Amino acid sequence: MAIISESEVGAQSRAQSTVDRVDQSARVLVAISVLALSPRELTAALGLGSKSGALKRVLRELLEGELIAMTIPERRTSRLQKYRINQREVQQLAEYTQSK
């Protein structure tokens, strides 16, 4: 029986958390690739029961990375707010896929 130290458990947990976040980021990008979705619509599209803290973190990270954009950026907390793919990123992706 191997004894695992607390630091190893912490490192494994952080690594799994990063993998989960990347997976959820990809799922969010796929979900909003066709049309802009509200947080409620996005939650349903991802099969989540409610808007979790993990989803909020993923949305914040994607916004900060400019991979997605808000449809009403001047009203961040609007009930009508939706998220869409950043058009610049779509163009870069299209150029990349054409070059392959």
Image (tube, rainbow, N blue to C red):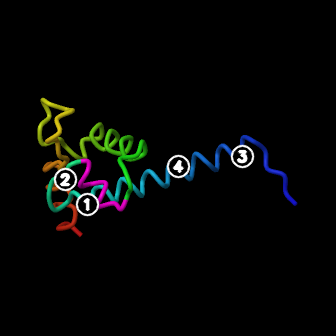
- Say left or right for 100 vs 56: left
For the point 20% across and 47% down, the residue is: 83
Q: What residue type is labelled 4?
A: Ser
The label nearer to you, 2 versus 4, is: 2
User: In this figure, which residue is indicated by the disc labeled 3?
Assistant: 8
User: In this figure, which residue is indicated by the disc labeled 1?
Assistant: 31
User: In this figure, which residue is indicated by the disc labeled 2?
Assistant: 37
Classed neighbour count for the residue bearing mark 2: other residues with Cα under 10 Å, few (<14), some (14–19), many (≥20): many
Q: How far apart are marks 2 and 1 (CA)?
A: 8 Å
Q: Which of pointers 4 and 1 lies earlier in the amino acid sequence? A: 4
Q: Distance between the residues labelled 4 and 1?
A: 21 Å
Q: Which amino acid does label 2 sit on?
A: Leu
Q: What residue type is labelled 3?
A: Glu
Disc ID at residue 17: 4
For the point 57% across and 50% down, the residue is: 15
Provide the major secondary structure of the magenta segment.
Answer: helix
Q: Where is residue 86 in the image (x, y as percent from the top left)?
A: 17, 48
Q: What residue type is labelled 1?
A: Ala
Q: Are marks 2 and 4 in contact (CB under 8 Å)?
A: no
Q: Distance between the residues labelled 1 and 3?
A: 34 Å
For the point 79% across and 50% down, the residue is: 4
Classed neighbour count for the residue bearing mark 1: other residues with Cα under 10 Å, few (<14), some (14–19), many (≥20): some
Which quarter of the figure is the N terminus placed in?
bottom right
